[in-house]
Image (cartoon, rainbow, N blue to C red):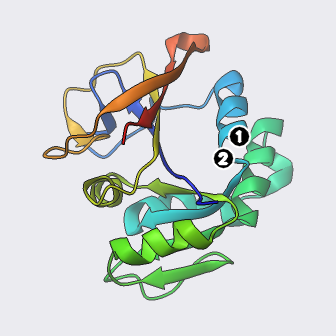
Amino acid sequence: MTAKLVYIAIASLDGYIEDADGSFTWAEPYPDLLAHVNALVRPIGTYLYGRRMYETMVFWETVEVDALDPGSRDFTGIWRQADKIVYSRTLQNRSSSDTQIVREFDADAVRKLKESSARDITVGGADLARQAMAAGLVDECHLFLHPIIVGGGKSALPDGVRIDLELLEQRRFSHGVVYLHYGVRN
């Protein structure tokens, strides 16, 4: 069985994962939302990251677990158990366990990883997701849209790539966050 490659993005209503200043403070994971994200990523065996996304997520490697709320403690354990592959030309050292640094995105290598993995894979980081989508590797998109318009920044979805999607699930969370789960039509 081939593992799925899933793209998960927390975005503003106008489709940005961060605003023009690089901030995403508006993307707070409220308890009900975090519980859903934890259930979503629990089956993930490998995270594929670009450098900037990895540098954001590596927080979970060193955070003091006892200081966290239960949902964040759960996420920390899930994140720490998964393998991570970081695509970066500049990153010299890994800051987390079970992490390898790869210099260039290689669609064929990711295709082989999907074929050989017993657990699903997720791709994080807008540019890396664009490359995976352009290569036809992404099987599902999970979007969490926050009720805010930030007016610009880093887009959650790529320009110049067409993918036909099928809505598989939708849900409204507290604070007006809307979840959309799409499968890629072949």
Q: In the image, is residue 4 above or below residue 143?
A: below
Q: Name the kind of residue labelled 1 in the image.
A: Asn
User: Residue at coordinates 68% horizontally, 78% vertically from top-left?
Assistant: 97
Q: Position of residue 157 (x, y in %)?
A: 28, 40
In depth, the one of 9 and 91 nearer the eye is: 9
Q: Quadrant of residue 72?
A: top right
Instruction: Sort mark 1 into few (<14), some (14-19) or many (20+) by Cα contacts within 10 Å.
Output: some
Asked if residue 137 is positioned above or below residue 34 in the image, the reply reads: below
Image point (36%, 42%), residue name: 186
Which image quarter holds the N terminus? bottom right
Q: Is residue 15 left or right of residue 116?
A: left
| Residue 14, percent from left and from top | 27, 24
Q: Which mark is residue 41?
A: 2
In terms of secondary structure, where does tag 2 sit?
Answer: helix
Q: Which mark is residue 38?
A: 1
Q: Is residue 70 left or right of residue 171?
A: right
Nearer to me, 114 or 122: 114
Badge 1 element: helix
Dot 2 amino acid type: Val
Horizontal arrangement in the rendering, residue 174 relative to residue 162 (left or right): right
> Is mark 1 in CB contact (under 8 Å) with mark 2?
yes
